[in-house]
Amino acid sequence: YICYHLLKGVKKVRFESLKGKEFIEATKGKRLGFIQELDLEFDLTTSEIHQLVIPKYSLLGLRKDEQSLMLQWIDIRVIGQEIILIDR
């Protein structure tokens, strides 16, 4: 489980449940894409998550390593049923 803080407390979410969700930039309403694969970058001493690394794919389904989307964990506003809202 991944725990994240909300105004009303702490919520738990399974890492696997993040796959398939769409990322939307809340302030502009811009769609950033869907999560097919996901890596976490975190601090080994504190276990705090720093950022999500979401690889981008070409039209042929090939992974583009140099163009991964890096989202800071502190920028995530809400993790919903189908979308994740972020502030950038």
Image: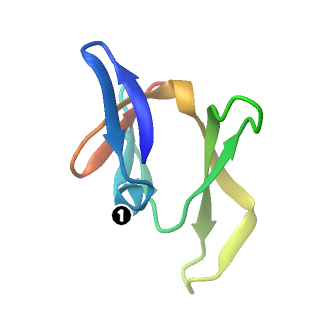
Which amino acid type corresponds to the residue marked 1 in the rendered image? Gly
Name the residue beneath numbered marker 1: 20
**Residue 25 visible in the current orientation:** yes
Q: Residue furthest front?
A: 45
**Is label 1 in a helix, a strand or a loop?**
loop
- From this view, report whether residue 51 is shown above or below residue 20: above
Quarter of the image where one finds residue 42: top right
- From this view, report whether residue 63 is shown above or below residue 60: above
Residue 13 drawn at (x, y percent): 35, 45
Nearer to us in this view, 8 or 69: 8
Q: Residue furthest top?
A: 7
Nearer to us in this view, 88 or 19: 19
Report whether 13 appears left or right of 44: left
Report whether 15 appears left or right of 47: left
**Residue 27 visible in the current orientation:** no
Q: Residue at x 65, y 35 (%)?
A: 47
Q: Residue at x 35, y 53 (%)?
A: 22
Q: Residue at x 57, y 87 (%)?
A: 60
Residue 14 drawn at (x, y percent): 38, 53
Nearer to us in this view, 29 or 70: 70
Quarter of the image where one finds residue 74: top right
Residue 1 drawn at (x, y percent): 42, 48
Q: Residue at x 51, y 26 (%)?
A: 75
- From this view, report whether residue 9 is shown above or below residue 73: above
- From this view, report whether residue 84 is shown above or below residue 86: below
Counting every numbered tag in the picture gives 1
Crowding near pointer 1: few (<14 within 10 Å), some, many (20+)?
Answer: some
Residue 76 drawn at (x, y percent): 45, 30
Report whether 69 appears left or right of 67: left
